Amino acid sequence: MKIHQETEVQKFNRLYKELDDLYHDIALYAGLSDSACSILYAVCTIGDGCLQRDICREVFMSKQTIHSSVRNLEKNDILYLKKDRGRDRQIFLTEKGRGLVEEKIRPVIELENDSFLGMDSCERAEFIRLSEKYVENFRKRVKTMVREQEK
């Protein structure tokens, strides 16, 4: 039984890594780094004026990676920062950035939506429910492992 479970986990991991590889291909297609592509995707979905911390929460990348990539996008006139409260900076797309998002990012969102809608509503709900259950179970076990190591 254990071997069968490991095979299922390995298959799931391969699918996850294949999906990650597809997003890498999308970044290459857009002429962007993976982090820059994720940032532009997040700005597109969250909206202009979002904060770096909003993007961090959305794409699960470190603040340092987001900060560095935002700076590069700013240097390339893809986005600009506007002072907000305290040390916060809002992120806005430039005209060039809006063009890039419309040409390269929005079509990806449409592909995702079309792919997701390729499942019926019950399948979509079940897919989300099971994915959330897996992530929650995995999160609990990772936290336990980390706590044990810290002792």
Image: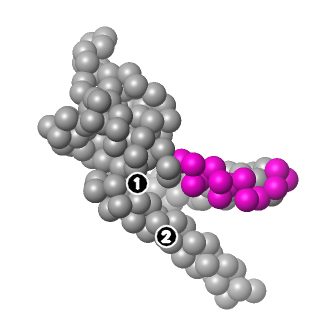
Q: Main secondary structure of the magenta part?
A: helix
Q: Which mark is residue 17?
A: 2
Left or right of 21, for residue 122:
right
Looking at the rendered structure, the secondary structure element under dot 1 is helix
Left or right of 8, for residue 50:
left
Foreground disc of the pair 2, 1: 2
Name the amino acid, label 1: Glu
- Is residue 115 part of the magenta span, yes or no? yes
- Measure how far apart labels 2 and 1 are at the Cα level: 29 Å
Image location (x, y in percent) of residue 9: 62, 75
Camera-side residue of 44 and 145: 44
| Residue at image location 32% in from the left, 22% down from the top | 90
Question: Which residue position holds label 1?
Answer: 150
Start-end of magenta stretch: 109-122
Looking at the rendered structure, the secondary structure element under dot 2 is helix
| Residue at image location 85% in from the left, 53% down from the top | 122
| Residue at image location 40% in from the left, 49% down from the top | 104
Q: Quadrant of residue 101?
A: top left
Classify the position of the C terminus by image quarter.
Answer: bottom left
Name the amino acid, label 2: Lys
Q: Judge the density around disc 1: few (<14), some (14-19), many (≥20) Cα neighbours within 10 Å.
A: few
The chosen color scheme is one colour
Q: Which mark is residue 117?
A: none
Camera-side residue of 130 and 1: 130
